[in-house]
Amino acid sequence: MVGVDENLNIVLNNVSGVGDKVFKVVINGKFVQELSLIEKPFDLKALADRLSKVFPGMVKLREDIGAIIVMEKIKVTAEGVEGAGLAAEKVKTVYEQFIKEVKQTQP
């Protein structure tokens, strides 16, 4: 889900369709009775802050694409770390520790 307005109109992105097609879908709020938060959203900002302590001045939070870019070459999303080399391994270590701590605080 990428958006919802005051009328409960909902925008879904990356909805699988027929074959390999992926669609953006808008659901009219007249058909929505309730919205519930099942899972806390991934806190990219908190992870970016943590990475900034290890890589000062080399971390960019890109909320528009839902990613953190480290050293202009390592991409971090809620799904994991993309990149290779020693720096990417350190980013993966920080990411894994962050995920572990988040899971421990969730009920």
Image: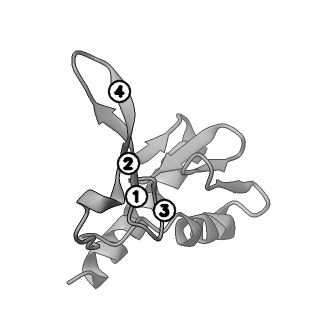
Residue 20 position by quadrant: top left
Q: Amino acid at mark 3?
A: Val
**Residue 65 falls left or right of residue 35:** right
Disc 2 is placed on an element classified as loop
Q: Amino acid at mark 2?
A: Glu
**First in sequence: mark 1 or mark 4?**
1
Q: How is the image coloured?
A: one colour
13 is higher (above) or lower (below) than 54 = above
**Residue 69 falls left or right of residue 100:** right
Residue at 48% x, 65% y is 5
**First in sequence: mark 2 or mark 4?**
4
**Residue 58 falls left or right of residue 45:** right
**First in sequence: mark 3 or mark 2?**
2
Identify the residue position indicated by label 3 in the image. Answer: 94
Task: Name the foreground residue: 65 vs 77.
Answer: 65
At which x and y percent is residue 82? Answer: 49, 38
The numbered dot on residue 79 is 2
Q: Nearer the viewer, mark 2 or mark 4?
A: 4
Q: Nearer the viewer, mark 1 or mark 3?
A: 1
> For mark 4, does the 10 Å Cα neighbourhood hold few (<14), some (14 to 19), or many (20 or more) residues?
few
Disc 4 is placed on an element classified as strand
Task: Name the foreground residue: 26 vs 66.
Answer: 26
Q: Amino acid at mark 4?
A: Val
